[in-house]
């Protein structure tokens, strides 16, 4: 167990690899991820390193739009609750400090925002993906 903050790209990689390792074994989430990602896991992980590197280390390497790939996923509150449970547990297991808190805070805010956008997306008949 390492108890230090998330300070480098190697730390970000460790967080992302450990998190998605657990996701891929979780009965609620594994099927949803595998169905969409198929054999593109290496690319997905690379993208997520860049996403969290941008958020936590202020190294701007991610230029995507996070929401659109989630708009049509078969997910509801219970999936986001599970995502957050695994993400928070992974951060707590590996890191401690300001960036570790920020990672959990950011994950929670994004999960909240995605759920609001997904609800809106369904209500408006799939017209909005922004
Ligand atoms: C129920 C919860 C979630 C599920 C099932 C889920 C699933 C996925 C899947 C399948 C992809 C890959 C899409 C593709 O490449 O075809 C993806 C991409 C991504 N996810 Fe999630 N996700 C969830 C929650 C979150 C949360 C809370 C965050 C924010 C921290 C997040 C951030 C991202 C980002 C940044 C990408 C890459 C977007 C891009 O293509 O640029 N996801 N997600």
Image: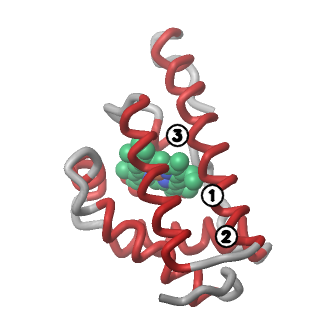
Q: Residue 50: give x, y in percent of width and height.
A: 60, 72
Q: Residue 78: give x, y in percent of width and height.
A: 37, 33
- Ligand 1 within 8 Å of disc 1? The answer is no
Identify the residue at horizontal 67%, vertical 43% (top origin).
109
Q: Given contact means CB atoms under 8 Å apart, are the residues at marks 1 and 2 in contact?
A: yes
- Ligand 1 within 8 Å of disc 2? The answer is no
The residue to which callout 1 is attached is: 104
Q: Dot 3: within a 10 Å radius of its alpha carbon, few (fewer than 14), some, or many (20 or more) residues? A: some
Q: Residue 70: give x, y in percent of width and height.
A: 46, 40
Q: Which mark is residue 18?
A: none
Q: Secondary structure at mark 2?
A: helix
Identify the residue at horizontal 53%, vertical 10% (top origin).
124
Of 77 and 118, which appears nearest the observer? Answer: 77
Horizontal relation, residue 48 to residue 44: left or right: right
**Colour convention of the picture:** secondary structure
Spatial CA distance of label 1 from label 2 is: 7 Å
- Ligand 1 within 8 Å of disc 3? The answer is yes
Q: Quadrant of the C terminus?
A: top right
Spatial CA distance of label 1 from label 3 is: 22 Å
Identify the residue at horizontal 72%, vertical 65% (top origin).
55
Instruction: Please name which of the two marks, 1 or 3, marks the residue nearer to the observer.
Output: 1
The residue to which callout 3 is attached is: 68
Q: Which mark is residue 100?
A: 2
Identify the residue at horizontal 73%, vertical 71% (top origin).
99
Of 53 and 36, which appears nearest the observer? Answer: 53
Q: Residue 11: give x, y in percent of width and height.
A: 58, 85
Q: Secondary structure at mark 3?
A: helix
């Amino acid at each position: 167990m390492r108890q230090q903050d998330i300070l480098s790209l190697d730390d970000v990689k460790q967080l992302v690899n450990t998190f998605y390792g657990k996701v891929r074994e979780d009965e609620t989430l594994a099927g949803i991820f595998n169905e969409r990602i198929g054999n593109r896991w290496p690319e997905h992980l690379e993208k997520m390193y860049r996403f969290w590197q941008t958020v936590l280390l202020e190294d701007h390497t991610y230029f995507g739009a996070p929401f659109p790939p989630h708009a049509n996923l078969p997910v509801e509150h219970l999936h986001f609750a599970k995502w957050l449970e695994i993400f928070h547990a992974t951060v707590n297991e590996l890191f401690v400090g300001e960036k570790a808190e920020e990672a959990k805070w950011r994950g929670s805010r994004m999960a909240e925002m995605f759920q609001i956008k997904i609800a809106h997306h369904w209500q408006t008949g799939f017209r909005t993906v922004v």
